[in-house]
Image (tube, grey):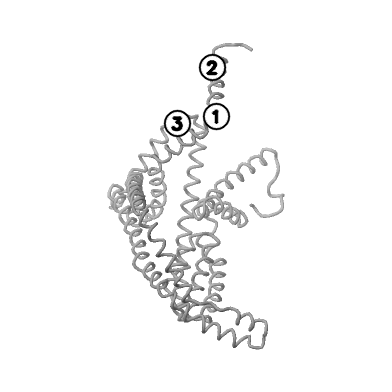
C-alpha cells in the first residue's frame, strides 16, 4: 500500500472514526445524556419551526388570495402583506382556541358535572326497557336480577378517591407550577422564533441554499432542494385538506343533529371536527363519545345518532375526502392505513398525522427511482398490468 499523504489522511480519519464509535459504545449513557441536554436546549427552536410550518399554510393562502404576491397592479407590496397575513392567521388560531375554551370546554364540563345524576336516572329506565324487551328470555332476566349496581356507593367511592388524592395533589403543586412556567416560556420562545421564520422565510431560504452550495456538490444540493420542496408540498397539501375535511364533517354533523333534534349537537359537532383531524380512526372516536353522551339521555336517539354517523361517514369517505384531500399526498389507501398504524404505535396521535405525508414522500421518491431504473433497462411500463401505483 502506498503510504502517501492522501492514504495517510484516510487512515487517520478511519482511526478517529473508530475511536469515536468505541467511546460512544463504551459511554453510551453519557452520550445519551449529552444528546438529551442538547435536545432540551434546541427544543424551543424545533417547536418554533413546527409552528411556523403549520402557520405558513393559512398565511400563504391569505397572502396570495387577499394581498397578492407583489406590488404590481396597485396591490399592496409584500412588505405589508406578510405582517397582515401573519396577524390574520394568528387571530384565526386564537379564535379557534377561544371557541374551544368558551364553547366546547364549558359544555363538556357541564355535561360531566351532570353525568352522575344522568346515569342514576338512566339506569332504572334502561333496566325497565331491557326487561320489557326480554321478559320472555329467562336467562337474561336472571342476569338482570343478579346485576345490582349501587350508584350512590360508586359515586361516594369516586368522591373519596379524589378526597384522599388531594394531599398528593397539594404536594405536587409547586412542581406543577414550575412545569407550567417552563412550558409557557418554551412556547413563548418558540412562537417568537416561528414569527421570525415566517416574516423572513425568503431570506432564510437563500441563506440555507448558500450554506448547502458552499459545502456540498451542486447535484447533491439540487437533489436535497427537490426533496425539501416535495416534502413541503405534500405536508402542506395534506394539512390543508385534512383541516378543511374535518371542518366540513363537523358542520355536517352539527346540521344533521340539529335537524334530527338530537342532544349535544354543538358539542358533538365540534368534537367530530377535532377528532376527524386524526386520519381514518378519528371520526370513530368522536362517534363513540357522542353516542355515549346521547345514550344517557335517550337510547333510541343514540341509535339514531349511530345510524346517522354511518351514513355521513360513507358520504365523507366516498365523496368529500377524495375531493378535498383526494390525492394530495399521492399515497394508495393500503399505505395510508400502514402509515397511520405505524405512526400511531410510535408517536401516538402526532405520529398518525406526520407519518402519512412522510410515507407519501418516501413512496413518491421510491416510485420515481423504480421508474428510472426500469427505463434504463428498457422495460416498457405500459406493457405491465395494473394501475400506475
Which of discs 1 and 3 lies nearer the camera? The answer is: 1
Residue ID for mark 2: 9
Residue placed most toward the observer, 308 or 244:
308
Residue placed most toward the observer, 3 or 65:
3
Residue 324, horizontal then vertical, whole percent? 50, 62
Residue 205, horizontal then vertical, whole percent? 40, 39
Label 1 to label 3: alpha-carbon separation: 36 Å
Label 1 to label 2: alpha-carbon separation: 26 Å
How many neighbours does mark 2 have within 10 angstroms: few (below 14), some (14-19), or many (20 or more)? few
Q: Quadrant of residue 18?
A: top right
Q: Is residue 287 above or below residue 14?
A: below
Residue 161, horizontal then vertical, whole percent? 44, 65
- Quadrant showing the N terminus: top right
Residue ID for mark 3: 213
Q: Residue furthest top?
A: 3
Q: Residue at x 59, y 88 (%)?
A: 132
Disc ID at residue 26:
1
Tag 2's secondary structure? helix
Residue placed most toward the observer, 182 or 329:
182
Earlier in the chain: of badge 2 and badge 3, it is 2
Residue 232, horizontal then vertical, whole percent? 47, 47
Amino acid at each position: 500500500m502506498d503510504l502517501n499523504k492522501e492514504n495517510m489522511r484516510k487512515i487517520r480519519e478511519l482511526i478517529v472514526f473508530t475511536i469515536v464509535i468505541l467511546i460512544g459504545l463504551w459511554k453510551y449513557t453519557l452520550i445519551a445524556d449529552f444528546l438529551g441536554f442538547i435536545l432540551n436546549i434546541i427544543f424551543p427552536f424545533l417547536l418554533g419551526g413546527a409552528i411556523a410550518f403549520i402557520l405558513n399554510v393559512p398565511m400563504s393562502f391569505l397572502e396570495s388570495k387577499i394581498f397578492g404576491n407583489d406590488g404590481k397592479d396597485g396591490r399592496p407590496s409584500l412588505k405589508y402583506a406578510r405582517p397582515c397575513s401573519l396577524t390574520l392567521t394568528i387571530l384565526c388560531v386564537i379564535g379557534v382556541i377561544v371557541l374551544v375554551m368558551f364553547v366546547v370546554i364549558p359544555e363538556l364540563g357541564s355535561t360531566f358535572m351532570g353525568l352522575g345524576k344522568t346515569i342514576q336516572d338512566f339506569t332504572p329506565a334502561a333496566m325497565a326497557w331491557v326487561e320489557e324487551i326480554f321478559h320472555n328470555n329467562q336467562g337474561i332476566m336472571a342476569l338482570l336480577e343478579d346485576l345490582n349496581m349501587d350508584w350512590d356507593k360508586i359515586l361516594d367511592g369516586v368522591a373519596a378517591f379524589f378526597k384522599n388524592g388531594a394531599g398528593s395533589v397539594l404536594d405536587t403543586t409547586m412542581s406543577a407550577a414550575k412545569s407550567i412556567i417552563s412550558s409557557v416560556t418554551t412556547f413563548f420562545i418558540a412562537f417568537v422564533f416561528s414569527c421570525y421564520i415566517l416574516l423572513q422565510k425568503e431570506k432564510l431560504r437563500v441563506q440555507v441554499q448558500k450554506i448547502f452550495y458552499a459545502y456540498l456538490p451542486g447535484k447533491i444540493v439540487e437533489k436535497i432542494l427537490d426533496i425539501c420542496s416535495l416534502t413541503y408540498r405534500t405536508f402542506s397539501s395534506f394539512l390543508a385538506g385534512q383541516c378543511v375535511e374535518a371542518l366540513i364533517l363537523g358542520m355536517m354533523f352539527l346540521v344533521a343533529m340539529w335537524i334530527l333534534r338530537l342532544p349535544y349537537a354543538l358539542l358533538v359537532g365540534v368534537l367530530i371536527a377535532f377528532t376527524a383531524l386524526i386520519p381514518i380512526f378519528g371520526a370513530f372516536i368522536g362517534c363513540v363519545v357522542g353516542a355515549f353522551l346521547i345514550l344517557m339521555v335517550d337510547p333510541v336517539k343514540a341509535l339514531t345518532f349511530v345510524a346517522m354517523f354511518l351514513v355521513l361517514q360513507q358520504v365523507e369517505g366516498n365523496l368529500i375526502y377524495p375531493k378535498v384531500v383526494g390525492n394530495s399526498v399521492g399515497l394508495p389507501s393500503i399505505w395510508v392505513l400502514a402509515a397511520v398504524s405505524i405512526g400511531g404505535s410510535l408517536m401516538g396521535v402526532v405520529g398518525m398525522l406526520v407519518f402519512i405525508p412522510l410515507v407519501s414522500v418516501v413512496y413518491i421518491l421510491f416510485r420515481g427511482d423504480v421508474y428510472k431504473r426500469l427505463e434504463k433497462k428498457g422495460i416498457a411500463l405500459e406493457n405491465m398490468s395494473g394501475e400506475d401505483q
